[in-house]
Amino acid sequence: MSSRFDRFKREVLNLPNMITIGRLFMIPPVLLLIDRSDPFKCLIAMLLFMIASALDIADGWLARRRGLVTVFGKFMDPLADKIMVMALLVYLVADGRVPAWIVVLLLAREFYISGLRLIAANESVVIAAGPGGKAKTAFQLVGICFILVHYQYRMPLFGADSLDFGVVGFWLLMLSIVMSYYSALEYTVLFGQGMASRRADA
């Protein structure tokens, strides 16, 4: 019994995985803090979201450094990213800050890639994440941060009388859509090459 618990603890209850799970518990406070009538709450929501996003880097770094890369972690880490981003985007649609069609396009891409990954896993085809997917994630996270702030602020240090964070966030999300579909095409090509290589080896 002890050895089973030790294996479970190492596979699931290690520090990197606990950080990953903890990121999910940061989503409800961010959603509760989104308030059109209170710029300060919006700023706090953005800061919490930034912390949750930064913890994604921390858990991966810890897992590699301590040799705690696990099957559970490989599954949970990208899932936490998707839940965090999509939960925020859906809520921001309901709040009128993000057009619904943006979320539809991003969800369609995620379902498509998830389907390809499932087929690739069943066929034992390994496809490494490309730079397009990483760029997509970066644009999404930064765009959401700007949209969470939402309001216009004076930015004299940057040579602008004011900066509309909501507008900047919208265009960053537009860039994330472009990178999303570019990375989907990139992944599709790699998937096709992997499947062709597997058939050639069979």
Image (cartoon, grey):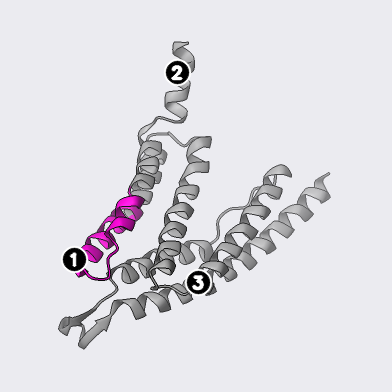
Q: Residues within 10 Å of mark 2 (few under 14, many from 20)?
A: few
- Identify the residue under disc 1: 40
**Front residue of 25 and 125:** 25
Q: Horizontal placement of 187 versus 33: left or right?
A: right
Contact check, label 3 and label 1, Cβ < 8 Å: no
Which of pointers 2 and 1 lies earlier in the amino acid sequence? Answer: 2
Q: Secondary structure at mark 1?
A: helix
- Identify the residue under disc 3: 100
At x 82% / y 49%, what residue is drawn?
A: 199
Q: Residue furthest top?
A: 1
At x 49% / y 49%, what residue is drawn?
A: 78
In the picture shown, does residue 163 fall above or below 105? below
**Front residue of 122 and 94:** 94
Q: What amino acid does circle 2 point to?
A: Phe
Q: What amino acid does circle 3 point to?
A: Ala
| First to last magenta residue range | 26-53
Q: Mark 2, mark 1: which one is toward the viewer?
A: 1
Q: Residues within 10 Å of mark 3 (few under 14, many from 20)?
A: some
- Identify the residue under disc 2: 5
Residue 160 image position (x, y, % from top left):
22, 87
Q: Does residue 86 appear anywhere in the picture?
A: yes
Q: Secondary structure at mark 2?
A: helix
